[in-house]
Amino acid sequence: MLENLVIYKEINWGFLTLCLELIITVCSMTGFGRSTNTEANIEVTVEIKSVNHRYFEYSSRIPRTYQYLDESIKELLKSKIVRGKVEASVSIVNNSENSLLLDINDAYASALISSLRKLGKKYKLKDDLKLSSLVGNKDLFNVKSVDIEEEFITNLVLNSAGEALDSFIEARGREGKKLVDDIIGRADNILGKVTVIEERSPETVKEYRVRLENKIKELLGDSTVDEQRLLTEIAIFADRIAVAEETVRLRSHISALKALLETGGDIGKKLDFIVQEMNRETNTIGSKAQDIEIGKIVIDIKSEIEKIREQIQNIE
């Protein structure tokens, strides 16, 4: 049976090519892959699924007889999966004609026949005991599964696990692309709002000057306004509400976010840190800018950042 079996541990060029393509791809932590292979009437099905998790966490559902496969499957998955709560399910069905053996329970059969005959004598019953009278008794036989050669089943299961892993990674990659598209769209939306803030910020200084002049004239009547003092007050106000540094840093964080998404790979934790910094700069803008319009824009930006944070939680 081993001659026709392709051993997955040997170089699988198709899988290697897939890995090279996906190494620069952002992958979601949720995914599903399945593969079924049959060799010498032994049918093996492996399913792999995962959900979000901070680290790599593995669990499995494998028939007790084949628990020795667990560590090999875990190592295979761990070599390609960085983060996620991963579960592997293995089904092994032996459809060959000699897959089961029936052993006679001689001790039970002997005791049963003896008891039946003793019962017949005691109650003066006709001794018509036949084989057909006994075959319906399930305790007469011990049913045993024929052991499958360990090397054969190991190779067959690992082949199926490898194919399921290929499918699983592809699914994660497709989901990851959707996440990237959504995040970039929201990041661009934030950039547009930052532009509005940058355009609006100088206007708030002009509006403050008008309000301040009107207030002074109201208080002083026809007296001449001290232009130098007015300029000083405006300069102090402008410095206090200036958000140029924050908007520049926010733009820089968004550029870093996009660069990471283009790089791909294991970037989930790095993205989370960048989003924290984006949120920090946005909060500072909100606290410094004394303007209702900018305040509304800041709320919109924070909403987008929170949605980006939610999406990042799904990235490996």
Image (cartoon, rainbow, N blue to C red):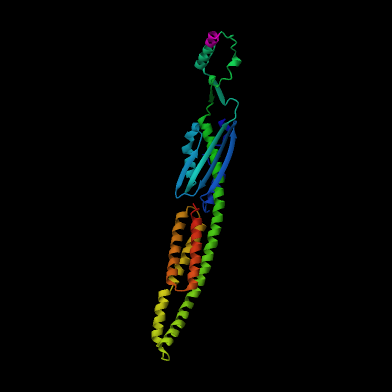
Tag count: 0
Q: Is residue 307 magenta?
A: no
User: Where, quadrant-wise, is the N terminus in this rendering?
Assistant: top right
Rendered residue at 56%/52% (across/down): 175
Rendered residue at 44%/66% (across/down): 283
Q: Position of residue 291 (x, y in %)?
A: 47, 74
Asked whether 209 or 68 is in front, the reply is: 209
Q: Left or right: 106 with respect to 131?
A: left
Asked whether 1 or 238 is in front, the reply is: 238
Rendered image quadrant of residue 129: top right
Asked if residue 222 is positioned above or below residue 196 in the image, the reply reads below
Please provide the residue range marked out in magenta.
117-123
Asked if residue 295 is positioned above or below residue 93 in the image, the reply reads below
Q: Position of residue 38 (x, y in %)?
A: 59, 34
Rendered residue at 50%/14% (across/down): 111
Q: Position of residue 198 (x, y in %)?
A: 49, 73
Asked if residue 203 is positioned above or below residue 270 in the image, the reply reads below
Rendered residue at 47%/62% (across/down): 256
Asked whether 112 or 77 is in front, the reply is: 112
Asked if residue 124 is positioned above or below residue 14 in the image, the reply reads above
Q: Is residue 120 magenta?
A: yes
Q: Position of residue 86 (x, y in %)?
A: 49, 44
Magenta stretch, main secondary structure, is helix
Asked whether 19 or 212 is in front, the reply is: 212
Q: Residue furthest front?
A: 123
